Amino acid sequence: MTEIAFASATELAGAVRSRELSPVEIAQALLRRIDEVNPTVNAYVHVDHEAVLARARELEAAITRGDSLGPLHGVPYSIKDLTAVAGLPMTWGLVPLKNQVPETSATIVTRLEAAGGLLLGKTNTPEAGYCGVTDNHLFGPTQNPWKLGRIAGGSSGGAAAAVAAGLGPLAEGSDGAGSVRIPASCCGVYALKPSLGRIPITIGANRFGTYVQHGPITRTVEDAALMLAVTEGFDPSDPVSLPISGGDYLQEIRGDIRGWRVAWSPDLGFAEVDPEITAICHDAVRAFEELGCSIKESHPGWDNPEDAMWKGIWLPTYAFAAPLLDRKVWAGKVDEHLMDIAEEGARVTALEISNANLFRGRMWDRFVAWFEDFDLLLCPTLCCEPFENGRFAPARLEGQPLSRQLLGWLLTYPFNMVSSSPVASVPCGFTRNGLPVGLQIVGRPRADAAVLRASASFERARPWARRRPPL
């Protein structure tokens, strides 16, 4: 088997069942790796060695007793610092919340625990998860494992960097505009934004959000399928959560995609994409031809959704922070852009939000009608390679309005606006600077199994999981 740090969750689960490895051996190996690598990468912001080892001993005792073992028994995972774990810090990367410790865990955490998972710690995020660059005043920036000094993406940047750097095979992320797919693309790992409601989500007090989902970040598609199977299903904490799908994701990924009709869009019809990114993604699309798919260049025909995303989702989401982030108190201790967004969010009008939601409805109508002719849509995840840490946006967007700087380098957020469609980001190549590039695989509404199958088919044709960053 691969060395423990880079073994897949599936491999580790099998090794625990066969008693080739014990949960304590796995915990010790990962903690050593975290001690060696995390000071450089800054993926984890909280790791309690004693608690990890105590949990590992509990899991080992269960094996000794002959207890029934869950599908993740002894398998390490991490949780993003936006998601609640009872008794552990949940700072959201914000100085005002540095002492926040929740009393209860999010549903996704309780399900990972019930499956026998081994929690390693909490991973870094931008302040309140508000942007695609993981940096904050509490913990500083997360580094890209492939090229230190470059961004790891966000807002689940710590999660993706941890997986890429061999600091745990399973990472929980959350995605409201691309926040699992952006860092997966930057860090050369796999991520899935499931269909709306597939995994119950309770990050904020609003229980009726229709754009944000938890999603797995892993090195292999099989691990993501395993994590989704463990965490899906209705829970009363989330009124829009779905029942268990009834399918077998691990069986589904073994099927082929021969005869599938695939749309390829280099820019979704509105984005400015770096030619090198387009070329790398276009080359990856050829793998789908080799797999027996028919390919047609097409896109849903949307008008540019940036303004509707900004006024209908981004600003209303962060308006809650306006009373919390008083400039007189927190200037220099909270990201100025976040305070700008919170203040503008408090001023956005009901008419602007209503018009944005009407636009979103038109996007949905056009999307589902267009998708009748296709089984999948492929497009780049990002418009550019990961840029330098310390920047808020690519250099070409410098001086542009804040909304442009946030959204103008992403091809992810439209699929949160039509959020019932699952979307994955698969590693598909490297730039001339040695930085990873991601390709998005978009499915029809609630077709999570199809996206996983297509992802696994691409992984078999263009394998990536054994390649490691040069740390």
Image (cartoon, helix red, strand yellow):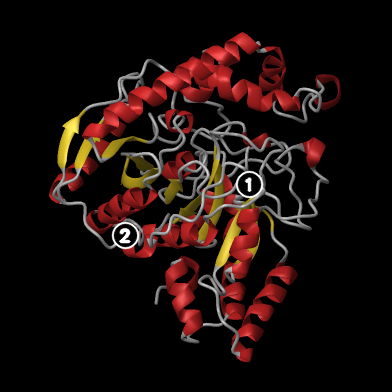
**Tag 2: amino acid:** Ile
User: Which residue sits at x=55%, y=79%?
Assistant: 69
Q: Amino acid at mark 1?
A: Asn
User: Tag 2 or tag 1, which sits nearer the N-term?
Assistant: 1
Residue for badge 2: 253
Query: Quick one: quadrant of the N terminus?
Result: bottom left
Apparent side of residue 312 relative to residue 204 in the rendered image (left or right)? left
Q: Furthest residue to the right?
A: 329
Q: Residue at x 14, y 45 (%)?
A: 289
Q: Residue 124 bears which disc, if any?
A: 1
SS category of the residue bearing label 1: loop
Tell me the quarter of the picture where residue 333 sits. Answer: top right
Return the x and y of residue 98 as percentages of the image width and height: 80, 43
Q: Residue furthest bottom?
A: 65
**Depth check: 289 or 35 in front?**
289
Q: Is residue 451 above or below residue 378?
A: below
The image quarter in which residue 442 lies: top left
Question: Do we see residue 469 in this rendering?
Answer: yes
